[in-house]
């Protein structure tokens, strides 16, 4: 049987699209040591511009006919769907780093107190980078909620088990899993993986679709724009909401193959729209306002997203740029 195109013949994984050509370490040095000196970073705002509000999720669980979305920060969301509590890419640490004295630090504290989380039934992981798979948080969740089921792309399970997780389900792109009345589908993303320089792309990266009897949501994870959003919509849609990453995109020549910018998000939504069958789709912005990872000012992604969304003729009510901690409900 032929290998899927996102599997490397020699082992590991790859992005199968021409737009996904990766930049190497020399390009990183060019960006960080040369270009940043020639083009200094534009100033960031005072972190207090990022408003944090009290969350309003249902405790202990929401009714099965409700979909609630609470933004903890970055790509960490608490989703209440099918009567279950689901976390995405949880990180409660102060830094997105293997060491807590160096690396990107939080601009905004986690907007949900860890000790006030409702009972967690499932956790979905998009890939193994430190701002998405945080060792300390994994260990804390595994100890607090030992019965939770964790869903991860291929070969990420070992990292989770090493940190105390008992129940791990690994999936390849387009594979499905079921938890109660919730169906989960692992879907393509354009990114890369690796927690050390010598082990890039030995584990898979992905997004996830969560579907109940009444609701469906796409969590795109961490991704660049790729040509499979239409296929995701055709196979897994229509959706009530799509959580798409809007930040960490500058400079485009370096980041464009791994992270979307606001215009990319609009193009992705256009692909999804083609399969919505008249159903209203809300775009939820993620991957901004929490960790400083690239060169754009921290407050630029939401402002650019709003401006470009309206300029594209889209309904402003269908763009959710949530405040840290905010809960929104879809009935």
Image: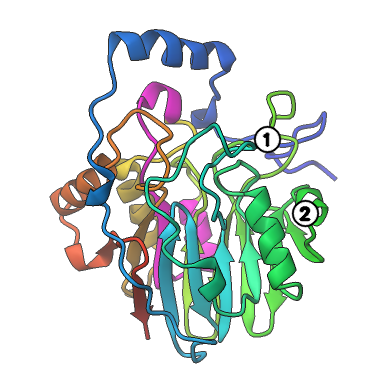
Vertical relation: 61 (above or below) 52 = below
Query: Considering depth in this image, is 7 or 58 the residue closer to the camera?
Result: 58
**Residue range corresponding to the magenta coloring:** 229-255
x, y percentage for residue 58? 45, 85
Vertical relation: 133 (above or below) 193 = below
Query: Considering depth in this image, is 10 or 43 the residue closer to the camera?
Result: 43
How far is the residue under mark 1 from the one under mark 2? 15 Å
The quarter of the rendered structure image containing the N terminus is top right
Q: What residue is drawn where x is 73% and y is 41%?
A: 203
Q: What residue is drawn where x is 33% and y is 54%?
A: 270
Is residue 281 among what the camera can see? yes
**Label 1 belongs to which residue?**
195
- First along the sequence among labels 1 and 2: 2
x, y percentage for residue 232? 52, 58
x, y percentage for residue 258? 49, 35
The image quarter containing residue 161 is: bottom right
Identify the mark at residue 163; answer none if there is no mark.
2
Query: Considering depth in this image, is 215 or 233 the residue closer to the camera?
Result: 215
């Amino acid at each position: 049987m032929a290998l899927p195109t996102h599997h490397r013949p020699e082992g590991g994984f790859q992005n199968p699209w021409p737009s996904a050509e990766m930049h190497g370490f020399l390009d990183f040095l060019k960006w960080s040591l040369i270009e940043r000196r020639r083009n200094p970073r534009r100033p960031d705002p005072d972190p207090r511009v990022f408003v944090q509000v009290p969350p309003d999720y249902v405790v202990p669980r929401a009714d099965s006919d409700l979909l609630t979305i609470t933004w903890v920060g970055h790509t960490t969301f608490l989703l209440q769907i099918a009567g279950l509590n689901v976390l995405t890419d949880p990180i409660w640490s102060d830094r997105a780093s293997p060491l807590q004295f160096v690396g990107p630090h939080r601009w905004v504290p986690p907007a949900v107190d860890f000790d006030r989380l409702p009972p967690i039934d499932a956790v979905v992981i998009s890939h193994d980078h430190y701002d998405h798979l945080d060792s300390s948080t994994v260990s804390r969740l595994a100890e607090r909620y030992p019965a939770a089921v964790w869903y991860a792309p291929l070969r990420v399970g070992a990292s989770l088990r090493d940190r105390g997780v008992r129940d791990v389900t690994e999936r390849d792109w387009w594979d499905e899993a079921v938890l109660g009345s919730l169906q989960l589908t692992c879907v393509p993303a354009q990114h890369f993986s690796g927690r050390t320089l010598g082990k890039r792309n030995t584990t898979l990266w992905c997004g996830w679709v969560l579907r109940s009897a009444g609701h469906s949501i796409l969590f795109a994870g961490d991704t660049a724009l790729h040509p499979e959003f239409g296929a995701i919509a055709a196979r897994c849609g229509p959706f009530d909401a799509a959580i798409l990453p809007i930040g960490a995109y500058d400079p485009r020549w370096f980041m464009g193959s791994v992270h979307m910018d606001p215009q990319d998000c609009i193009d992705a939504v256009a692909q999804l729209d083609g399969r919505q069958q008249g159903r209203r789709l809300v775009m939820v912005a993620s991957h901004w306002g929490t960790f400083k990872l690239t060169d754009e000012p921290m407050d630029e992604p939401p402002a650019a997203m709003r401006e470009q969304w309206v300029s594209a003729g889209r309904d402003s009510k269908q763009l959710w740029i949530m405040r840290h901690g905010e809960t929104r409900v879809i009935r």
